[in-house]
């Protein structure tokens, strides 16, 4: 299983982000708009019931998030082109509270330094230097902030060659 906790993005933002995606020549894969999300924690293989139990009483205030800036995580082989978020302490607290909750129940998750982002595309590093440069040069006009009222536990599956994120459970944030 590929379980992860993430914030879904609103459709209006998805459409704006779609305009920032590069063309998709060979070796470039674009995130489908409905899949655009902000990962809060990647769990991978895990016990769904145990995770649901850990989060059953999870409580956090809803928050405002604003997309801002573009970036690239340049890997040795593959790179990730992403849309960033405006600095947001509440979002970091949300991640921190979630990971504490998982830790308390002995549920393991990605331990790399968390950098909130929305993945827009992936490509091979060596073959797409120019594409990455052009991506970063684009104007990223300010988008409207959106209120995050929930996050979800997703299971990432591949169906007919397409990555799909299936909602396993939803967690509302307090208004
Ligand atoms: P693909 O099918 O192309 O791999 P994907 O990367 O979006 O698509 P998953 O690999 O299932 O799908 O990952 C789901 C989410 O978890 C994505 O946001 C991904 O960036 C994130 N993720 C995956 N592996 C890790 C990891 N080891 N550490 C942190 N986040 C991860
Ligand atoms: Mg992946």
Image: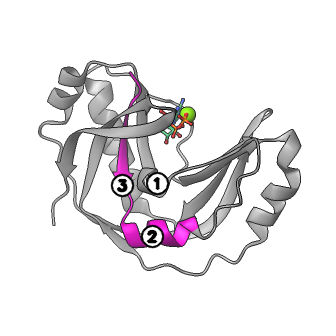
Q: Position of residue 11 (x, y in %)?
A: 38, 67
Alpha-carbon neighbours of circle 2 within 10 Å: few (<14), some, or many (≥20)?
some
Cβ at disc 2 under 8 Å from ligand 1: no
Looking at the rendered image, the quarter that the N terminus falls into is: top left
Magenta part of the protein: which range? 1-18
Q: Residue at x 22, y 60 (%)?
A: 61
Q: Residue at x 64, y 62 (%)?
A: 21
Mark 2 vs 3, N-terminal side:
3
Looking at the rendered image, the quarter that the C terminus falls into is: bottom left
CA separation in Å, label 3 and label 1: 7 Å
Residue named by callout 1: 36
Alpha-carbon neighbours of circle 3 within 10 Å: few (<14), some, or many (≥20)?
some
**68, 11: nearer the viewer:** 11
Residue 66 seen in render: no
Residue named by callout 2: 13
Assess whether mark 2 and mark 1 are in contact (beta carbons under 8 angstroms): yes
CA separation in Å, label 2 and label 3: 10 Å
């Amino acid at each position: 299983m590929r379980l992860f906790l993430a914030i879904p993005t609103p459709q209006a933002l998805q459409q704006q982000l779609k305009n920032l995606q590069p063309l998709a020549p060979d070796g470039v894969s674009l995130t489908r708009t409905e899949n655009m999300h902000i990962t809060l924690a990647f769990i991978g293989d895990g016990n769904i019931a145990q995770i649901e139990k850990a989060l059953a009483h999870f409580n956090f205030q809803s928050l405002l998030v604003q997309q801002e800036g573009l970036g690239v995580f340049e890997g040795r082989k593959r790179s990730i082109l992403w849309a960033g978020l405006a600095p947001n302490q509440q979002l970091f607290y949300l991640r921190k509270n979630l990971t504490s909750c998982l830790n308390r129940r002995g549920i393991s998750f990605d331990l790399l330094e968390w950098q909130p982002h929305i993945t827009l595309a992936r490509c091979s590093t060596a073959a797409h230097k120019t594409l990455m440069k052009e991506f970063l040069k684009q104007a990223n006009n300010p988008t409207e902030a959106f209120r995050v009222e929930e996050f979800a536990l997703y299971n990432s599956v591949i169906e007919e060659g397409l990555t799909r994120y299936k909602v396993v459970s939803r967690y509302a944030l307090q208004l």
